[in-house]
Amino acid sequence: MANFECARCHRIFERKQFEDVCPACFVLEEEEFEQIKEYLTLHPGATSSDLVNQLDVSLKSIKRYLRQERLEIIGDNKGFIKCELCGAPVNSGYFCGNCYREGMVMRRREESLALRNIDKPAGKLKSSSGKGIRFGKKSDEKG
Ligand SMILES: [Zn+2]
Ligand SMILES: [Zn+2]
């Protein structure tokens, strides 16, 4: 499995599917999203800056929820998130209506790319020198 950087805490974790955050942050996001949901229910028409100020949610997280189509921008989209293909403002998700099909095909293609690890082993630890201290054969102790 390819390793993936958590979009929230930037730790590297093993990605199981297409999740953006590590399992630890996933729990946090669920809690955070519950708060957002509640807030938006109580304050219809709240803006992203309301969420940032009132709930201490980062704009980055909000963007992520928009991308995941868990949130949607109502009305005027000031280019807060854009279509990944053509750059048109979108209210949620990764692609605009025109690019959606093409975009999803592209994503699937990216996700099926074969990967290999090119990490180099960290320096040789073994010394080639035969010198140094080592245990010798014990000579007979004197009684
Ligand atoms: Zn994380
Ligand atoms: Zn587009």
Image (tube, rainbow, N blue to C red):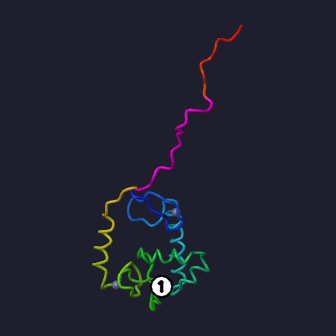
Asked whether 27 falls inside the magenta stretch, the response is no
Report the residue at 56% width, 80% height from top: 51
Provide residue 6's location: percent of width, then percent of height: 49, 64
* Quadrant into which the N terminus falls: bottom left
Residue nearer the viewer, 37 or 101: 101
Answer with left or right where residue 17 lies relative to residue 121. Answer: left
Residue nearer the viewer, 130 or 77: 130
* Quadrant into which the C terminus falls: top right
Report the residue at 47% width, 49% height from top: 121
Rendered image quadrant of residue 88: bottom left
Q: Residue furthest bottom?
A: 76
Q: Is mark 1 within 8 Å of ligand 2?
A: no
Residue identified by numbered label 1: 80
Provide residue 40's location: percent of width, then percent of height: 52, 80
How many marks the image carries: the answer is 1
Asked whether 123 falls inside the magenta stretch, the response is yes
Provide residue 83's location: percent of width, then percent of height: 38, 82
Q: Amino acid at mark 1?
A: Phe
Q: Main secondary structure of the magenta part?
A: loop
Report the residue at 33% width, 71% height from top: 107
Residue nearer the viewer, 67 or 108: 108
Position of 28 relative to 44 (above/below): above
Report the residue at 45% width, 89% height from top: 77
Position of 12 relative to 75 (above/below): above
Position of 143 relative to 75 (above/below): above
- Mark 1: few/some/many CA within 10 Å (<14, 14-19, 20+): some
Position of 4 relative to 63 (above/below): above
Element on which disc 1 rests = loop
**The residue stretch that appears in magenta:** 118-133
